[in-house]
Image (cartoon, grey):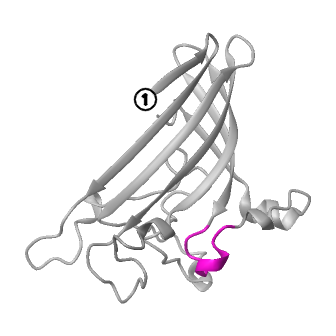
Amino acid sequence: YFYNTTKTSKLGVRLITGAGLPYGNSTTMPYNKQYFTGGPSSLRAFLARSVGPGSYHIPDSMTNIAIDQAGDITIESSVEYRFDILKSFKGALFADAGNIWLVNDDPQRPGGKFDFDTFYSQLAVGAGAGFRFDFTFIILRLDFAIPLRKPWLAEDERWVTDKIAFGSSSWRKENIVMNLAIGYPF
């Protein structure tokens, strides 16, 4: 939904939910039917397909291997304030939250099963700012985002806002995610 706040700005909100149940002797849905989160049109503060399921996270020893994280259940939301800077040059401030989960336990991915009592504590949260180059026939988008909540950390350490250090080059390298995309995220 979009709400016009002024003639040159608007507030957009989005909520996506979905669930798929594996059937027969399957424990998960087929790969091409599963849900993924993270990336330029999803949770922009996280790399594509890198979040979840649940509180599971790829071990550090495997981070150089491209392993997509997929799940059977998804919940994702975004809030974006869009405003004009100049004619075709626009800006945006945004926040995204969400994750994916599994219907069944997977011993290979502990913490990945959906539990109605704890799913909200496993939501990833990120925020950022971006620029849009709106040429009417094509929109180029450049977003910069940082994670505010990492669901794979210990429960009392998941909010990472107290660790933000823009002055540290190692923090910037590990936490600032740049997304270059065509079109709006929603």
Q: Nearer the viewer, residue 6 or 184?
A: 6
Q: What kind of secondary structure does the magenta stretch mostly adopt?
A: loop
Outermost residue toward the right in this view? 167
Q: Position of residue 79 (x, y in %)?
A: 55, 39
Q: Nearer the viewer, residue 12 or 130?
A: 12
Taking 84 as reference, is 186 above or below it? Answer: below
What is the three-letter code of the residue carrying label 1?
Tyr
Name the residue located 63 percent from the left edge and 72 percent from the top edge. Answer: 158
Q: Considering the numbered disc 1 on the image, is that residue within a helix, a strand or a loop?
A: loop
Query: Residue 145, position in %: x, y?
Result: 68, 49
Q: Is residue 13 above or below residue 145?
A: above
**Magenta residue span:** 150-159
Residue lying furthest bottom in this view? Answer: 107
Residue bearing mark 1 = 1
Q: Is residue 68 left or right of residue 142?
A: left
The question of residue 154 being in magenta is answered with yes
Q: Report the number of numbered marks.
A: 1
Q: Nearer the viewer, residue 138 or 39?
A: 39
Question: Residue drawn 30% across and 61% down?
Answer: 34
* Residue 37 is one of the magenta-drawn residues: no
- Look at 58% across and 49% down and name the residue there: 44
Which residue sits furthest left?
24
Tell me where residue 168 sits by quadrant: bottom right
